[in-house]
Image (tube, grey):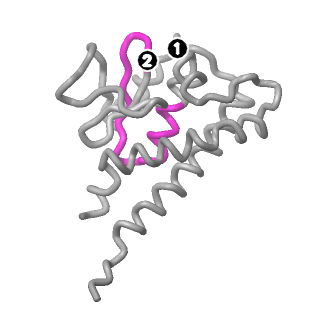
Amino acid sequence: MTEEEIITDVDTVLKVIKAINAKFPETMEKVNPHNPHRDPVNYYLTGSCVQYAEILHEVFKGYAKLCCTKGHAFVHIGKHYYDASGICFTAENKEEQFEEFSFEDEPYFYMSTLPFGRWDKQYDQLLENEFVNIGKEALGKIIAQKLQPKNTL
């Protein structure tokens, strides 16, 4: 398996999402102890989906394309589309019309998602930084583990 195949594999992406989501309660407590949200899916699917798309986009840099419908942001990695809940849908099973932005057109993604939910510069940027680091660390471990030569003795 090549590094690209590992990075874009559904199992890899879901493990990274799981690692990020598992750290959400303690990270939110650290960053903003007054925020009542402790569930990442609830938090990121009720007004902060753009931020989660940005997190995954940064973790899977070069392999994740930003996407959005009229009211939801997510990323396309490999053959699937992902948000904080995991797989939104597959390329073969699109549930609604959406735009997928090429790397050159990413500024248009941000213009398209301006009306979405909340954005608190003070806290959301701190959360994003923390989760990008958590995601990159998890992805690095997965890649190293899967590229490690198997001992066949």
Seen in the picture, residue 120 relative to 140 is either above or below; the reply is above
Q: What residue do we see at 36% from left, 32% from top?
A: 87
Q: Tag 1: Cα neighbours inside 10 Å, few (<14), some, or many (≥20)?
A: some
Residues shaded magenta: 52-72
Amino acid type shown at disc 1: Phe
Q: What residue do we see at 27% from left, 43% from top?
A: 78
Residue 116 numbered mark, or none: 1
Q: Secondary structure at mark 2?
A: loop
Q: How many marks?
A: 2
| Front residue of 105 and 10 | 10
Q: In the rendered view, does 56 fall on the left or right side of 126?
A: left
Q: Tag 2: Cα neighbours inside 10 Å, few (<14), some, or many (≥20)?
A: some
Q: Quadrant of residue 122?
A: top right
Image location (x, y in percent) of residue 152: 27, 84
Mark 2 in CB contact with mark 1 (< 8 angstroms):
yes
Quadrant including the C terminus: bottom left
Seen in the picture, residue 148 relative to 65 is either above or below; the reply is below
Q: What residue do we see at 41% from left, 68% from top?
A: 145
Q: Quadrant of residue 27?
A: top right
Q: Which is more foreground, mark 2 or mark 1?
A: 2
Amino acid type shown at disc 2: His
Image location (x, y in percent) of residue 88: 35, 26
Image location (x, y in percent) of residue 125: 66, 35
Residue matched to label 2: 72
